[in-house]
Amino acid sequence: MQYEKFLNDVSEDILFVTDEKGIITDANRQARKIFEVNGKKLKIEKIFDNQHQHLFLQYVTESILKQVERQFSIIYHSKYYNVKIVPYQKQVAICMRDVTDNQNLRHTLSEMMQRLTFASKIAKIGYWELDLVAKEISWSSEMFRIFGIDDKEISSKKNIIREQMHKDDLPRYKKNLRKIIKTGQPEEGFVRIIRPNGNIIYCRYMADYFNYDKYNRKIVGIFQDLTELLEIQHALEAAKESAERLNIEKSYFLAQASHDLQQPVSAMGLFINNLLNANLTGKQQILVERIYDSAQALHHLLNNLLDISNLDARGTKAKFKEFDLYNIISRIEKEIRYKLRNGKIKFKTVNCHQKIISDEFLVERILRNLISNALKYAKDKILIGCRKSKDSIRIVVLDNGIGIDKHELSLIFDPYYQSPKIPDNHRKGSGLGLAIAKKTADILGAEIGVVSQEGKGSNFYLEIKTNI
């Protein structure tokens, strides 16, 4: 008896004995600690609340009368207990085992499984295991949805994956599974699955081999349904191709329209020149000069539209050859100086005798657009110069104009962009000059950019590699 008492006292379970009235007649150390029995013969109703005391008294009475065991679970002081009542003549032995940790673990695992199931459903990922020893296969619920079958129709001995896989994909899939077993390395790929209704879905699979021992060898893997993603991708690709085709058609139309309009606009310029040379009154002279300025602006706009249309339609290709930058800059300088001979803007160039390999015509087009932009906003000074480095040469166009806000620096090379901060800015052009310069620089593989500070002018540059 002493040995039994010792065993009862070292047990972590709560053990006590009651009679048919629920009076505790004996208790182990754990019960005395929890219930504070201390040698007193307490009744069950003194220990538990109304709900639990009635439950205990009911099972104690039934157990003694019928001489049968009873088992149930309770929550006592925020802990979970499994309770077992065993009859012995007119008494019962009651064992309460604390299963709180197990219960919490069960709840945690249940929540994790719910989250995992939810994530698998959202990501459309199904999990499967093939037991190579038992020759049985098990699936997650998402696998049944992916394959379009009812879980009640599946036998663990039946390999539905192989049965429903497209016949052209099956040999490669089987080869990869054999490779997994041979190398112990995971494999992945893409296959088509044929559902019972005849629909074909596209899946990405991954599989790996687990060899715990000779009695426990498994291939485990996942299938992810990518059908909707592929359909969206194909739709986006088709939309992109359609948009590109329409953009090219639009560009060809603009190029043709601009080209057709150039002839009448040029003729209009000749007529206006003739008028300027005629005997006009003062008011007539002013009016014709304004018409001339508008015609020049229209001519410039048509040229820009033609240029941007050709660039968008990929109709411009660079013709690389060696040339001296001085030739371009000197041509531009003579032309600009003539135009500004009666103006207030001082135009200065720094001689730049530097031979490079590029497209001379396109480089000149870029510089003309940068200079044209500088002429619009400079107060009274424009400078063109070159800065040579180890593997490139930078051509700079500086002006002392109003500068550019830092928030607009990333926008000024966009087609048709014009700063809303500059009054009547739309009257100074179409916003195509810098966009043409940028697209042309891209064709040359050159870099174009700007350094500017609001109120302190701008420094536009074209940087061309010299080590090609």
Image: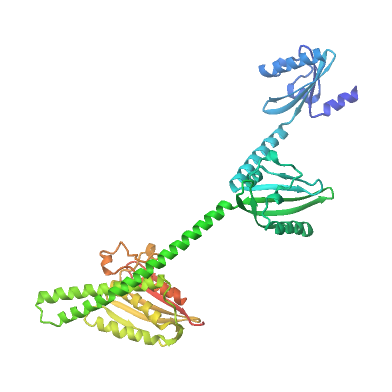
Q: In this view, does 34 lie to the left or right of 367?
A: right
**Location of residue 402 (image quadrant):** bottom left
Which one is nearer the viewer's eye here, 332 or 443?
443
**Is residue 38 left or right of 407 when viewed as pictured?**
right
User: For the point 30% across and 86% down, which residue is it?
Assistant: 334
Which residue in the rendered view is the most extreme toward the left?
A: 281
Query: What is the x, y in percent for residue 367?
Result: 37, 78
Tell me the quarter of the image containing the N terminus.
top right
Colouring: rainbow
Residue 317: tell me if it is visible.
yes
Residue 350 seen in render: no
Residue 131 horizontal side relative to residue 191, left or right:
right
> Between 407 and 130, which is closer to the camera in this rendering?
130
Where does the image place residue 372, in percent across and percent down from the top left? 31, 75
Q: Which residue lies furthest to the front in this view?
A: 198
Point 68% across, 26% down: residue = 77
Residue 110 coordinates in the image, percent (x, y) = 67, 37
The image quarter containing residue 247 is bottom left
Residue 138, horizontal then vertical, whole percent: 73, 44
Decide if residue 36 is on the left or right side of residue 298: right
The residue positioned 19% from the left and 81% from the top of the image is 273
Q: How many marks?
A: 0
Q: Is residue 447 above or below residue 201?
A: below
Observer-nearest residue: 162 or 289?
162
| Residue 2 sits above or below residue 173 on the image | above
- Towards the viewer: 363 or 204: 204
